[in-house]
Image (cartoon, helix red, strand yellow):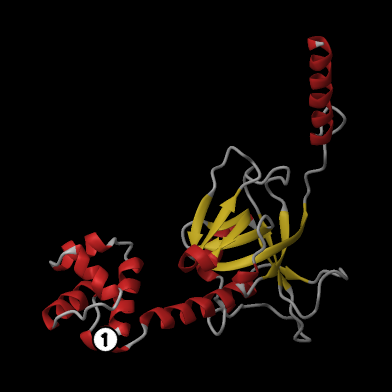
Amino acid sequence: MEVIGLNIKYLRKEKGLTQDELAKNIGVNRAMIGSYEENRAIPKLSVLKDLAYFFDISIDVLAKLRLWESQEVSKEKMLRGDNLRVLTTAVDQSNKELITTVPIKASAGYTSGYSDPQYIEELPHFALPFVELSKEKSYRVFQIKGDSMEPIKSGSYIICEYLLNWVEIQNGNTYIVISKDDGIVYKRLYNHLKDTNEIVLKSDNKEYHDYTLKTEEIHEVWKALGFISFSLPEGESNVSVNKLHDMILEMKNELNQLKK
């Protein structure tokens, strides 16, 4: 009895329905749905058939399996990457892992070829002699395009560390995200995985709107460590952010003096 009620509640919420909406779909009143979910009543066989048909499952599954628990386990395993995500890498003659570079011109192909060993092998790869990079971790370099993350310029190369466990995403830090529809993007991430199964992506350029991705839309997540750019800073004519901030403060002080 308890299993049926909890399964009905779980399946209803998975479809984003209210009790009233579910009741209308299976031909009962809202109060009955409440009594099922709170285990105050057991659905009649005819209602069980309608529920099973509506949720596209068998009556046996609805009555016996603890669907809410199996889903939570599956979700947690997906977030941690347990036996679900295998990273394809390139190695040198000594079997040491190399760092693969994904230039802008290869970005579209990477979305579909990220797990294809032959595709990865065809991309440029090299070793970086930096003590900050551990031999125990996997790294990749992605070239970014656009102005959404300025002051980091379009064409810069982002050095990244592979993130297997998405639960470890730190709010406000920058990452490369590979997804089905958006391809390769470089954004600041905000982790809402345990609550809504979503990641919020923010740009440093405020002209771009925030948006969200669900885990099932994401292929890979890479933690940004640093960047390489061939766009050198301009001369003194280029006003820095700090200098602009000081100018604004100075103007405010002058305005305050005038008011007095």
| Location of residue 222 in the rendering, given as x and y in whole percent from the top left corner | 65, 66
Quarter occupied by the N terminus = bottom left
Residue 193 visible at all: yes
What amino acid is labelled 1 in the image?
A: Ala
Q: Which residue is more in the foreground, 112 or 61?
A: 61
The residue at 84%/29% (across/down) is 246
| Location of residue 105 in the rendering, given as x and y in whole percent from the top left corner | 60, 56
Left or right, 85 with respect to 17, comes to right
The residue at 33%/87% (across/down) is 65
Please say if 47 is above or below 228: below
Left or right, 50 with respect to 2, comes to left
Residue 245's image quarter? top right
Check disc 1 and report its element: helix, strand or loop.
helix
Labels in figure, total: 1
Q: Which residue is more in the foreground, 58 or 209?
A: 58
Circle 1 packing at 10 Å, graded few (<14), some (14-19), many (20+), is: some
Identify residue for label 1: 63
Q: Which residue is more in the foreground, 46 or 199?
A: 46
Residue 86's image quarter? bottom right
Farthest residue, direction front? 40
